[in-house]
Amino acid sequence: MQKLISLLGCINLLASAVLGNPQCPNTLAVYNPNLRTMCSNETWFILPVAKASVASLVKPYTLITPPFSDKTLFPQGFPAGAHPVLVSSGYSNDIRMFFLGITALNTGAIIIPYTDRLKDSKTPFNYNVQTYIGGVDGQNVMGLVPALVGSAEGNNCFVAEFAPDSDAYAPIAPGEFSAEIKQVIVPNPLSGPGIVPEAFDLDFVTATSPLYTEHTFHALINQPLILTNTQCQRNNYYFNETFTEPTMRSGNVTLFGPTAGSAPAALAGKYIKQGGYSASAELVAYNAEDCAVAAKNTDPKALQ
């Protein structure tokens, strides 16, 4: 059971653009009964961060220079001297493995793609800076056990409070949406405020001139995840269902560093008019395995 809780609790999850009803069906569980599967609604943003700052977070590994000249991935190029960082927030439901299941969880993450785990300067991996997990409908402490067990098994997980906590994001003005994640260090649901520093927040609209393509996000999100136990994990997200409803976004992302929040100081700041992506995806998450094997067996269909 602990293995299931860990797997269910600690992975970056993709989520849909459908506001008001974040649920989507998990149609892949029947084909993968021994693996963790779910349907997730999430908004991702790509942030340009100074390469030296990003490199300081992935040690002992180094960074691979992304293919910025590939117009299918970076149609408008990328700021000189910067490396992409992925930030996500979303809602996942119908989470299943074997005969067990969890109805829903909130998740978010800070991820560094194009990390050189194999030291071959060409095979990209995702480096998990921080993963946030919380329960729905005000029950954020339901993420405590998954976060503890998940961290022990190789995921850098933290219990978090989400706003909204029962949807992928919330409307704040006509055509404008937001999502907010706070790390729960000391909860105090009964008598007053606890210690709950802000991690990051998203404020976005539908993009009229997208900075990236859907393929950009699929290619970055589906890179194998580096675990802290020398192994890696494939998490294949599929966007090919009728309920995917992909929407390109433009918005502001604020990461709160140690003086005001819980994000790493190397990433702290406000990133204006960045490119994002909201969509529903079905996830098939594999067990931890050798990193070279994970890279070799990543489903190319998920990268499209």
Image (cartoon, helix red, strand yellow):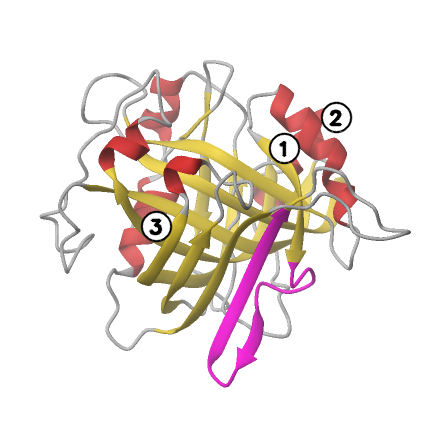
The residue to which callout 2 is attached is 2
Three-letter code for the amino acid on which mark 3 is drawn: His
Task: Report which quarter residue 249 is drawn in.
Answer: bottom left
The residue to which callout 1 is attached is 7
Q: Is residue 171 magenta?
A: yes
- Residue plotted at (48% across, 61% down): 202
Q: Are marks 1 and 2 in contact (CB under 8 Å)?
A: no
Three-letter code for the amino acid on which mark 2 is drawn: Gln
Residue 60 position, x and y percent, is 34, 15
| Mark closest to the chain's N terminus, 1 or 3 | 1
Majority secondary structure of magenta residues: strand
Q: Is residue 186 magenta?
A: no
The residue to which callout 3 is attached is 218
Q: Which residues are magenta?
A: 163-182
Residue 147 position, x and y percent, is 67, 32
Determine whether the residue tagged by mark 1 lies in a helix, strand or loop. Answer: helix
Left or right: 181, with 221 as reference point: right
